[in-house]
Amino acid sequence: RQLIGHAPNMTAEEVHELLVKAKAAQKEWAKTTWKQRRMVLRTIQKYVCQHVADVCRVSSRESGKPKVDAVMGEIITTCEKIRTICEWGEAWLQPSYRPTGPMMMHKSAWVEYLPLGIIAPIAPWNYPFHNSVSNAVED
C-alpha cells in the first residue's frame, strides 16, 4: 500500500472560511468571458495530457481498475468533455426561447442557464478523476 495523500480534518469554522473564499472566487469567475474560460479549460486539459501516467496510476490504485480502463474512462473522457465544452459551451448556454402555446400567447418563455455557485458533488468512486473534474468543468 502507498499513501496517496492526506486531507486534514477541518472544523466547521474552517470549512465556512473556505466556502466564503470559494463564493468570492465564483463571483469573479462569473464575470469572465468565454475566451478566458476556454483558456483555463485548455490549461487544465494540457495539464491532464502531461500527467497521464500519474492520473492513471492513482485512479487505478483508488478504483482497482486496470490502467487501460483509467486511460479510457479518466483521460480520454475528461479531455473530450473539455474539448466539447470549449467548442460548444458558449452556444449551449445561450438563453433559448420556448413556444408557449395558443392559451399563453401573451406570455414568453425561455430556458436560461445560471451558474450554480459552490457545489459539493457526491460522486461514485468508479471514475474518481473524471467525476471530480467533470463537475468543475461543467459548472
Image (cartoon, grey):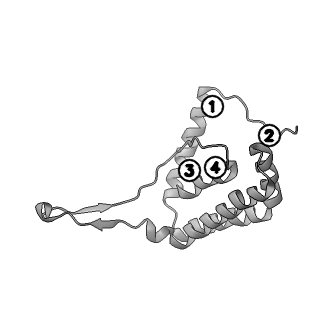
Q: Is residue 7 above or below residue 113?
A: above
> Going 53% across and 51% down the picture, which residue do you hit?
26
Q: Quadrant of residue 56?
A: bottom right
- The earlier-in-sequence mark between 2 and 3 is 2
Q: Please give left or right for residue 10 compared with residue 28 in the image.
A: right
- The earlier-in-sequence mark between 1 and 3 is 1
- The earlier-in-sequence mark between 4 and 3 is 3
Q: Residues within 10 Å of mark 1 (few under 14, many from 20)?
A: few
> Going 52% across and 55% down the picture, which residue do you hit?
139
- Quadrant occupied by the N terminus: top right
**Mark 2 → mark 3, Cα distance in angstroms:** 25 Å
Q: Which residue is mark 1?
A: 14
**Mark 4 → mark 3, Cα distance in angstroms:** 18 Å
> Is the C-beta separation of discs 4 and 1 under 8 Å?
no
- The earlier-in-sequence mark between 4 and 2 is 2
Q: Residues within 10 Å of mark 4 (few under 14, many from 20)?
A: some
| Percent of width and height locating residue 78 | 65, 61
- Give the residue type that dot 4 points to: Ser
Q: Residues within 10 Å of mark 3 (few under 14, many from 20)?
A: few
Secondary structure, mark 1, is helix
- Give the residue type that dot 2 points to: Gly
Q: Is residue 123 visible?
A: yes
Q: Please give left or right for residue 110 compared with residue 40 in the image.
A: left
**Mark 2 → mark 1, Cα distance in angstroms:** 20 Å
Q: Between residues 111 and 11, which one lies in front from this camera angle?
A: 111
Checking the image for residue 25, the label placed there is: 3
Q: Which residue is mark 2?
A: 5
Checking the image for residue 120, the label placed there is: none
